[in-house]
Image (cartoon, helix red, strand yellow):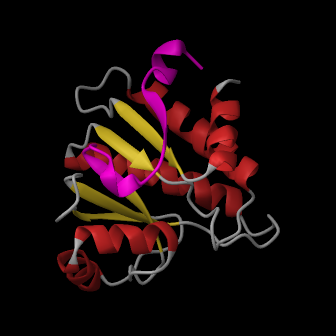
Amino acid sequence: MSKATDSKIEIHSGDITKLEVDAIVNAANSRLQPGGGVCGAIHRAAGRNLREACEKIGRCKTGDAVATDGYELKAKYVIHTVGPVWRGGKQNEDGLLASCYRTSLKIARQIGARSVAFPAISTGIYAFPLERATQIAVATVRDFLAQEQESDEAVDKVVFCTFGAEAEAAYRKELGR
């Protein structure tokens, strides 16, 4: 991929709820309810209004995404995407995970978010293998950014927000390829 595309990608190790970006992506459950991990942290930081907005939306399918306001977050928006539960790789988990990233970026563009932060979707309690998920995330984001280069509404910056040394190392390794 081109250096121009990779210059739009950053890695940040830490709390996604503290990032100053236009939109953060929530690794949501299909009912869009507060959960554990990243999802719970985003809901706690955004406040009660986020839960109410999610209840109005109702549900989201695996591989799809929806957006809400960010409420008490620094980010103006939260893009909720439902990653696949790892079931051995034989139930289109790779395709569904790629769809999470692609659909989230399309929604970011639609709502005017020029900077977007992603957690490592599906790698927590959904047990998607970290290195495999990282390869899919980086490849999908690179492809999307390469296609968007000429657009005035393009996403200018994507941040992979990692939690822990293992995840950070996996993203650094993949971006180095």
Q: From the viewer's perspective, is residue 142 above or below residue 99?
A: above
Q: Indicate left or right for 82 with 96 as reference.
A: left
Range of the magenta residues? 1-24
Q: Position of residue 62 (x, y in %)?
A: 53, 71
Say whether residue 16 is magenta.
Answer: yes
Q: Indicate left or right for 142 with 151 as reference.
A: right
Q: Position of residue 131 (x, y in %)?
A: 74, 47
Q: Going 47% across and 32% down the picture, which residue do you hit? A: 10
Name the quadrant of the C terminus. Answer: top right
Q: Going 63% across and 39% down the picture, which residue do you hit? A: 171
Q: From the viewer's perspective, is residue 145 above or below residue 50?
A: above
Q: Position of residue 130 (x, y in %)?
A: 71, 53
Residue 56, quarter of picture: bottom left
Say whether residue 56 is magenta.
Answer: no
- For this rendering, which residue is in front, 168 or 50? 168
Q: Going 51% across and 71% down the picture, which residue do you hit? A: 37
Q: Going 58% across and 51% down the picture, which residue do you hit? A: 98
User: Which residue is outermost to the top?
Assistant: 3
Q: Indicate left or right for 150 with 100 as reference.
A: left
Q: How many marks?
A: 0
Name the quadrant of the N terminus. Answer: top right
